[in-house]
Amino acid sequence: MKRGIVLFGHGSRNPAWAEPFLALREEVSRQQPDALVELGFLELMEPSLPDAIATLAKAGANEVVVVPVFISAGSHVREDLPRLAEAAMQAHPGLSVRIAASLGESPEMLAAMAAYALRSAGAEP
Amino acid sequence: MKRGIVLFGHGSRNPAWAEPFLALREEVSRQQPDALVELGFLELMEPSLPDAIATLAKAGANEVVVVPVFISAGSHVREDLPRLAEAAMQAHPGLSVRIAASLGESPEMLAAMAAYALRSAGAEP
């Protein structure tokens, strides 16, 4: 099995908005150099999620995990994303697409965000 | 000096969207039980940022640090937030309002998000 990861973001009209996503993809590759990882945006930015999944499928992935890089799951994550994942599986027979939880559903991420907030406020935990 | 922290989120029509924010506030209090911390939303949810700052001022804060709980800083963080911070300082003489960086500008947060993405994908770093 060959697994690919999509870091799924909303997208923005402002190109600078993508910078943390580019940095995040680099950091994933730094932590795991052989990870097959792409950015995929819902709207306003390229590559789109379907394009990101197609890139991973072309690279030989037969499983794709989409990680919603969202603090909280609103309608984009709860409704648009499952629809896009379903369409991608139909477009790429033999490819399985799984959706991970949003950041804010992870106790470890909440702990990291809380520590960041306290550190930013100059109030070390 | 008494410092307050606002965890600033976008807001959503879906009440469940607030859950990670409520959990984040609890986690901040768990990590630092005497932290003066409030949630403040830009739109669609209560309390608003001005209300959150007013609550902290009433509790005796003379400095408020607003932490944008956003992956990336778009126009809400770059334009709306400074305007709201300025208005809050005018509304509360003697109160200083400082804006922290968004999550995705912090190398530690990027490292935590990357590790989360790899873990979620079942590809431990």
Image (cartoon, coloured by chain):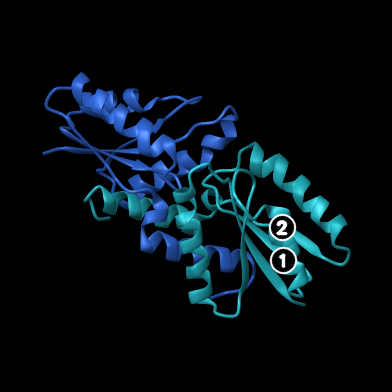
Chain colours: A blue, B cyan
Name the residue carrying label 2.
B51
Residue ranking furthest to the top: A91
Identify the residue shown where x is 57% and y is 74%.
A124
- Would you call the spot at circle 2 few (<14 residues within 10 Å), some (14-19), or many (20 or more)? some
x, y percentage for residue B104? 52, 49
- Using a 10 Å C-alpha cutoff, classify the residue at mark 1 as few (fewer than 14 neighbours), some (14 to 19) or many (20 or more): some
Q: Residue at x 24, y 43 (%)?
A: A34
Does residue A71 appear anywhere in the picture?
Answer: no
Is B13 left, or right, of A58 in this rendering?
Answer: right
Does residue B58 appear to the left or right of A20 in the view shown?
A: right
* Mark 1 chain: B
Quickly name the residue at label 1: B55
Chain bearing tag 2 is B
Query: Above or below — where is B33 with respect to B40?
Result: below
Residue A17 lies, with reference to residue A104, above or below; the image says above
SS under mark 2: helix
Q: Is residue B95 left or right of residue A21?
A: right
In which quadrant of the rendered image does the N terminus of chain A lie?
A: top left
Observer-nearest of B39 and A44? B39
User: Are discs 2 and 1 less than 8 Å apart at CB?
Assistant: yes
* x then y, percent, for residue B48: 67, 52
Q: Label 2 vs label 1: CA separation?
A: 6 Å
* Tag 1: amino acid: Thr
Which one is nearer the viewer's eye here, A49 or B59?
Answer: B59
The relative height of residue B108 versus residue A14 in the rendered view (above or below) is below
The kind of residue tagged 2 is Asp
Residue A105 in picture, x, y percent from top left: 37, 55
